[in-house]
């Protein structure tokens, strides 16, 4: 990776990561307030409705966005054909949501589900209106500008959701927060990057988008089953309260990996797409990205693991044990979250080199195993069994991705392990610290603050020592690049 592209990628990742961290803090604050004011049944209603909304939402893109970003050159006809396709799909999804809501209501036996699905489905059309400016900014690697609508949307979501919760709107707090975020972020990106709205239809261009996106869409369809079969089984068999406990465990267990993926995916896809025909540079870029994704993923998920009891009792429960039934499942899903964060950049690289069929194959293997095991796991082991199945299923992707990447890119297992070795060892040290600390300290705000502060410092010291303090050198380089860029912009 040449210095210019490397520097630009590092700066974009930094801006994106800072944006996502701020959004994470805002969403976490929202989650804490809502968890203290809503019941597990409220979370269960929205969680079950979200299964159907996410399924419909997959038809809103069908791989079109990645097809536009992955192309080295894009014509006006192709671009506006993709926009027209997105708008049509958004309107169709909203129309279908009325009938789809009735179907889901019968499955969950709760009249609130249908209304929640219809309201949440409006986001499909709203997001389509922001497709052009968002995609163009991503192609041009202008991720700093994209942080503004993302943060703005989260600020609005936080204000609306918390306000609705204090007004006693129960599960509608979650729904209205999501819709408000969608409207705000779309409006802001349109203002920041005004793009003429034109409707065009080029059959050849549409066919090309759909051909590229078909593998991604089928992979996402399987991913939908993968990520929602657990919710469906628990909701249908165990009811709203049990699903609410699982939703808390899964949402927090996957927060870090969702944050990391959102921070790096768009930047890495745009960067790797530029290097798709340069095998050696692509491999080096992936290994560097993996090292820092591993650094962040292990730190975040091990911290969550050792702080899980304090989180459920003090932070989410307000000093009560109302969320403690989710404790073991949360700890298992911390392992899932770390593993998922480390594996997801592989999918980004596979998409960049034009091999989305490999994602489809991987998701097919994982989905078949998970769906087959979920019901017996729930029946005999409860929520903890479901968490174990979800974690083990996701790990199976290693056996699909890496043999192909080793053959096509020369990516060896030792080189991959070296990239994450320091993070894993630092994570082991942090886990041991948490175990020893718990033997001498009861649950309190002091124990939470101490484990958070001292644990993070310990992890950074161990990781820095094992890598020769390279992380701080890279941080200085990124800072210097950002200062130079800022000075050039000012001039």
Image: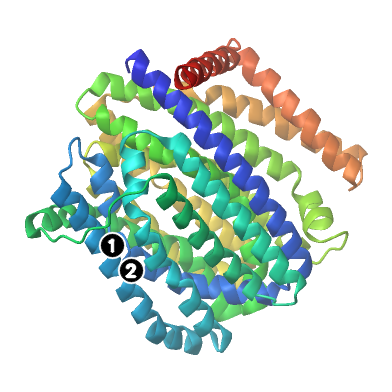
Q: Which residue is mark 1?
A: 86
Q: Which mark is residue 317?
A: none
Left or right relative to 480: residue 67: left
Residue that mark 2 sits on: 90
Helix, strand, or loop for circle 1?
helix
Tag 2 secondary structure: helix
Q: Is residue 15 left or right of residue 400?
A: right
Residue 161: percent from the left, percent from the top? Answer: 66, 65
The residue nearer to you, when weighing 159 against 388, is 159
Q: Residue at x 46, y 38 (%)?
A: 145
* Residue at the extreme left of the image, as rendered: 204
Residue drawn at x 44%, y 72% as measured from the top left: 122
Task: Estimate how packed mark 1 is, as few (under 14), some (14 to 19) or many (20 or more) residues with alpha carbons within 10 Å.
Answer: many
Q: Which is nearer the eye, 116 or 318?
A: 116
Is 400 placed above or below 172 here?
A: above
Looking at the image, which residue is at 92% across and 38% down? 440
Residue 332 percent location from the top left of the image: 63, 51
Please tell me in which quadrant of the rendered image residue 86 appears.
Answer: bottom left
Q: Would residue 261 be visible to someone looking at this image?
A: no
Q: Which image quadrant for residue 110? A: bottom right
- Mark 2 burial class by Cα count in 10 Å: few <14, some 14-19, many 20+: many
Q: Is residue 52 visible?
A: yes
**Placement of the N terminus among the 4 image quadrants:** top left
**Residue drawn at 62 percent across, 25 percent down:** 425
Quadrant assignment, res 407 = top left
Task: Choose between 267 and 303: the one closer to the eye.
Answer: 267
Q: Position of residue 366 (x, y in %)?
A: 39, 55
220 versus 351 height, above or below? below
């Amino acid at each position: 990776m040449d210095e210019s592209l490397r520097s630009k990628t590092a700066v974009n990742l930094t801006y994106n990561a800072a944006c996502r961290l701020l959004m994470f803090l805002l969403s976490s604050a929202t989650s804490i307030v809502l968890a203290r004011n809503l019941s597990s049944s409220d979370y269960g209603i929205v969680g079950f409705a979200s299964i159907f909304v996410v399924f419909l939402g997959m038809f809103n893109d069908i791989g079109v966005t990645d097809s536009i970003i992955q192309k080295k050159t894009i014509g006006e006809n192709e671009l506006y054909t993709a926009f027209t396709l997105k708008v049509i799909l958004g309107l169709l999804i909203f129309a279908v949501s009325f009938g789809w809501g009735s179907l889901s209501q019968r499955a969950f036996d709760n009249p609130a589900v249908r209304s929640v699905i219809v309201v949440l489905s409006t986001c499909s059309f709203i997001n389509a209106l922001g497709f052009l400016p968002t995609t163009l900014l991503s192609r041009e690697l202008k991720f700093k500008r994209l942080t503004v609508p993302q943060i703005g949307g989260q600020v609005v979501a936080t204000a609306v959701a918390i306000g609705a919760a204090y007004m006693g709107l129960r599960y509608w707090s979650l729904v209205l927060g999501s819709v408000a975020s969608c409207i705000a972020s779309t409006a802001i990106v349109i203002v920041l990057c005004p793009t003429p709205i034109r409707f065009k239809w080029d059959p050849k261009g549409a066919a090309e988008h759909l051909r590229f996106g078909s593998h991604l869409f089928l992979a996402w369809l399987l991913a939908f089953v993968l990520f929602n079969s657990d919710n469906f089984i628990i909701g249908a068999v165990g009811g709203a309260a049990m699903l609410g406990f699982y939703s808390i465990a899964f949402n927090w267990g996957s927060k870090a990996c969702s944050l990391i993926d959102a921070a790096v995916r768009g930047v890495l896809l745009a960067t790797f797409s530029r290097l798709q025909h340069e095998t050696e540079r692509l491999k080096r870029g992936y290994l560097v990205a993996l090292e820092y994704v591993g650094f962040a993923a292990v730190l975040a998920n091990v911290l969550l693991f050792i702080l899980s009891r304090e989180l459920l009792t003090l932070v989410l429960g307000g000093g009560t044990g109302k969320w403690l039934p989710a404790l073991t499942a949360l700890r298992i899903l911390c392992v899932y979250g770390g593993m998922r964060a480390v594996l997801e950049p592989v999918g980004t690289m596979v998409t960049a080199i034009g091999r989305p069929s490999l994602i489809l194959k991987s998701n097919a293997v994982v989905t078949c195993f998970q769906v087959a095991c979920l019901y017996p796991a729930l029946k005999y082991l409860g929520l903890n069994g479901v968490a174990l199945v979800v974690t083990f299923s996701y790990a199976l992707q290693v056996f699909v991705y890496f043999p192909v990447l080793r053959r096509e890119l020369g990516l060896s297992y030792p080189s991959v392990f070296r990239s994450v070795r320091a993070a894993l060892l630092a994570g082991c040290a942090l886990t041991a610290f948490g175990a020893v600390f718990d033997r001498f300290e009861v649950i309190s705000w002091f124990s939470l603050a101490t484990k958070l502060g001292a644990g993070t410092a310990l992890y950074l010291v161990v990781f820095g020592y094992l890598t020769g303090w390279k992380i701080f050198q890279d941080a200085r380089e990124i800072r210097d690049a950002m200062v130079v860029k800022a000075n050039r912009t000012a001039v």
